Image (tube, rainbow, N blue to C red):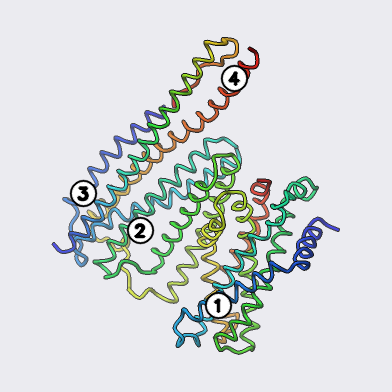
Amino acid sequence: MEHLGYLFAAYSIIFAVIFLYVLFIWRRQAALDAELRTLEARMAALNESSPAAGSSEPRTDI
Amino acid sequence: MNSAIRNGLGYTTLALMIAALFMVFDYVPPEAEQGIAQLIFYFHVPLAWVAFASFGIVAIAGIFYLWLGDQLWDDLGYAAAETGMVFCTLMIVAGSIWAKPIWGTWWTWDSRLTTTFILWLMYCGYLMLRASADDTPQVARFAAVLGIVAVLDVPIVIASVRLWRTIHPAVLVTKQGGHGLEDPRMVATLMVCLAAFTALWAWLLMLRFMQLRTRSRMGTLAVRIAFANAAASDSK
Amino acid sequence: MSGFAAVLRKDLRLELRSGESTLALLALSMLVLVVLVFALDSARLRSVDVAAGALWVAMVFAGMLGANRALLAERDNGAIRGLLLSPLDPGTLFAAKLAAALIFMAVAEVGAVILMVLFFNLEFDQSIARLAPILALGAIGFSALATLLSAITGRTRGGDMLLPILAVPIFVPALIAGVKASAAALGGAPLSSMGDWLRIMIAFDVLFVTAGYLLFELVVGED
């Protein structure tokens, strides 16, 4: 089968790039989650120190 | 509910992709003249459709953002631009790899390749604009305007490139797939691949879109917390 | 005096006093043509296709330089705020900026055409006269697009590279049509034979002048 190399190259690249994009999204998500935890901690600290100033629970459901 | 959509799309993509691969490698009959590299066509065409569709979404999201002002539309536009860029690049790469054994060259300025390349450049510009500035509402507005302006231009690009190539045809007579698919099995395979890539695109778009939504919401939240902190320390 | 005329007069007067933008545009046109003369195979220099192509390359680059400077004066001194606070509506402001950019580009074009005829061994005859409407259509479209986009790129960190990357792909249809029509004109063809190309350029111009007029208020502002 001639040109098999080309076929293999095309398909591998397609799936590799898609996989890399998913990976990119995954890592961004991890960073976002870390940031979210920080914010939640600050929120909690605020609610403890002055209950009157605290606002409602932040919506974290997406 | 968004998570349900996202997960649903993910599983649909998986199922359709498996079906598509099966059909391409096991079911569809080989094409008479082009040999096995012709199979790239079944991925190349869906990639093209998805790249153009994404571009349309960028523009529509831009219009809604300018009209309604909701950050949600800007997030959608940005996500669509990213995913569109990924698929547009893949389309060009796949097309190029297909071209080499079939036409003997990695690239040629025929009307479709040229138009796609222009589209790819427009994506580049859009993403560079977003990268060169912070995430402010002004930049969101700029991006929306750019997206609208670019998509309005696309029909003129297609017309002019087609006219250009009609008068000066590409050196190589290109075999454009998508017309003259004789065997109904080929058509069926193409349809399944189309569905599979549309699902994949929708899933990736949903993933990235939800991520950008979260980020936007967190930005608002951080501001509120900062204010609350300031207020709390003032009252002490 | 209408707002449009006021702004236009201001820009022109500023330029007449210093002349630095015009000089820069003419210099850039000339330099681009010189580079192309040396870069291209000398046997081809007699070809009208090459001459037309070189002309448009010079115009596009000069046009981008001109567009950047169209809003530069106001940006430097924060004078944009004054313009925005005035009763002048943004669409009219766009029209005035477009007119100024157009005039600068026309000056650059005249210079480029003269140099093209000299460098590429052409004649100052009727074919040059036929070039005029083609170049005018191209200048209108490019100025409209660049005025709108430079309002955006001037306010972001992208630097000077951002305007070309945004403008060039969008300008492609007018570029293709303009070069093809120009080459035909230089080859002696009458304007009636270029109907398709001219229609594309007119469509492009209408689209971007309108879009610029309507969208300018969304993108113009202080940094």
Query: Does the image show residue C211?
Result: no
Badge 4 amino acid? Ala
> Depth-wise, is mark 3 or mark 2 nearer the camera?
2
The residue sitting at 48% across, 32% down in the picture is B215
Query: Which of the 4 image quarters holds residue C105?
Result: bottom right
Q: Mark 4 near mark 3, Cβ–Cβ under 8 Å?
A: no
Badge 3 amino acid? Met
Residue B114 percent coordinates (x, y)? 42, 65
Q: Which residue is mark 3?
A: B23
Residue A30 percent coordinates (x, y)? 37, 31
Could you classify mark 2 by the number of other residues whose Cα lies within 10 Å: few (under 14), some (14-19), or many (20 or more)?
Answer: some
Q: Are marks 4 and 3 on the same chain?
A: yes
Q: Is residue B150 above or below residue C38?
A: above
Q: Which residue is mark 4?
A: B228
Badge 2 amino acid? Ile
Q: Are marks 1 and 3 on the same chain?
A: no
Closer to the chain start, of discs 3 and 2, is 3
Q: Which residue is mark 2?
A: B92
The residue sitting at 49% across, 43% down in the picture is B77
